[in-house]
Image: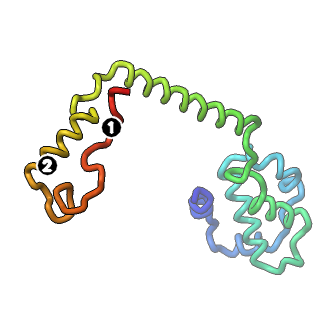
Amino acid sequence: MLRNAIVRAARPSTSALSCRAASTAISNPTLANIEKRWESLPLQEQADLWMSLRDRMKESWTELTIAEKKAAYYIAFGPHGPRSADPPNENQKVALYVGLALVASFVLFAAARAFANPPPPTMTKEWQEATNEYLKGQNSDPLTGISSEGYDGKGHVQSPSERA
């Protein structure tokens, strides 16, 4: 997207001069060692070079020099920008930061559990069994629930017994 903006901003005029310039080869010093210089070139120079290469490639490719072909390939597909190699030790840093985040979240969770209030009395198995008996006495949900004929579910019991 940035390249498109650069290309649009640096687009040369369609004068006869620019048409004549497209037919001449780009000088070898301009293209020399482009792989090492590309990242350090100012954006305007990158755009100018790419535009002149693009204009040269619109014509017959047999007229392109080897240096122009190599430069065009590097600019289009070379390991720069988003295709550049990861910095050294990138994977170790990611693993370290993920591990630190997991440890920090565990410490936060443990601290929250340590200072939390005890569970409410409604979470005991005895309370939940009493709730089942109360609902049976009230004939609650007589078609499919706890008061129905042949019901064999746990009802509201979900906690283990405290007597263990």
Q: Tag 1: residue type?
A: Ser
**Residue that badge 1 annotates:** 159
Q: Dot 1, how many residues are within 10 Å of its Cα: few (below 14), some (14-19), or many (20+)?
A: few
The quarter of the picture where residue 93 lies is: top right
Residue at the image position 30 percent from the left and 54 percent from the top = 153
What element does badge 2 sit on? Answer: helix
Left of 105 or right of it: where is 137?
left
Instruction: Name the residue rendered at 29%, 23% in the picture.
Output: 118
Q: Disc 1 to disc 2, how far (Cα)?
A: 18 Å
Q: Residue 29: x and y, percent?
A: 88, 53
The image position of residue 121, as x and y in percent, is 22, 29
The way the protein has been coloured in the rendering is rainbow
Closer to the chain start, of discs 1 and 2, is 2
Left or right for 126, reference 87: left
Residue picked out by circle 2 = 135
Q: Residue furthest top?
A: 115
- The extreme right residue here reads 66
**Above/below status of 91 relative to 113:** below
Residue 130: image quadrant is: top left
Measuring from the top left, give residue 49's x and y in whole percent.
74, 59
> Which three-letter amino acid code belongs to the residue tagged 2?
Leu
Image point (76%, 36%), residue name: 88
Q: Nearer the viewer, residue 136 or 33?
A: 136
